[in-house]
Amino acid sequence: MAYLSQKLRCHQGLTLIEIVIAMAILAVLATAIVPMAEVTVQRTKELELRRSLRTIRSALDAYKADYDKAVEEKKIIVTIGDTGYPEELETLIEGDDWGGLYEQNRRYLRRIPTDPFDRDDEGWGLRAYADEHDSTVWGGQDIYDVYSQSDKLGLDGTPYSSW
């Protein structure tokens, strides 16, 4: 009995086979986790893209609503061809007082949100009010809508440029 307990005390480390099996299990787990992590990163970027598009589009709508209100209250004079949408995105940051409708410039954004899928610093794709709903060429008159210029597909299979 003493011989058996002494033999067990000397044999407390891991064998080479046990280490190889443990490493194989870890490798299988790692190959399963890496793709899940990539999908999680892409999903997070998609959420950020949706949030950015919603923020800019809401600001454009608020700008147009204030334009319409200023026209209705005769604070500004409408010119031919004027749609009421801003001519550039920076106008949403600078704001407008709408001919005295507000005491000071009403700002619609603190900053222009970025496109998380924009790798080439192209910025947002712009559409004018007169452009087609899926146009990829901006007419230049005003900014009615924005879209991502990424050519990648979302997790649902739709291109980000169609969001």
Image: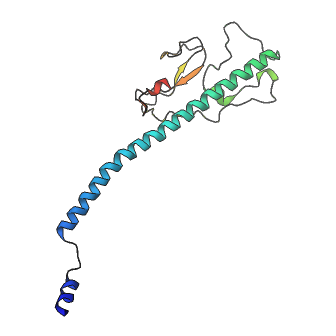
Rendered position, 48 above or below 137: below
**Quarter the N terminus occupies:** bottom left
Residue 108 image offset from top left, x and y in percent: 68, 31
Rendered position, 28 above or below 113: below
Q: Is residue 56 left or right of residue 115?
A: right
Residue located 49% across and 15% down the image? 135
Task: Please state which of residues 145 and 140 is positioned toward the viewer in this rendering.
Answer: 145
Residue located 50% across and 28% down the image? 123
Q: Is residue 120 left or right of residue 10?
A: right
Rendered position, 40 above or below 141: below
Residue 76 image offset from top left, x and y in percent: 78, 15
| Displayed quadrant of residue 139 | top right
Residue 82 image offset from top left, x and y in percent: 68, 11
| Displayed quadrant of residue 127 | top right
Residue located 69% across and 26% down the image? 62
Residue 103 image offset from top left, x and y in percent: 82, 29
Chosen colour scheme: rainbow
Q: Is residue 115 left or right of residue 61?
A: left
Residue located 61% across and 16% down the image? 142
Task: Please state which of residues 17 and 71 is positioned toward the viewer in this rendering.
Answer: 17
Q: Residue furthest top?
A: 80
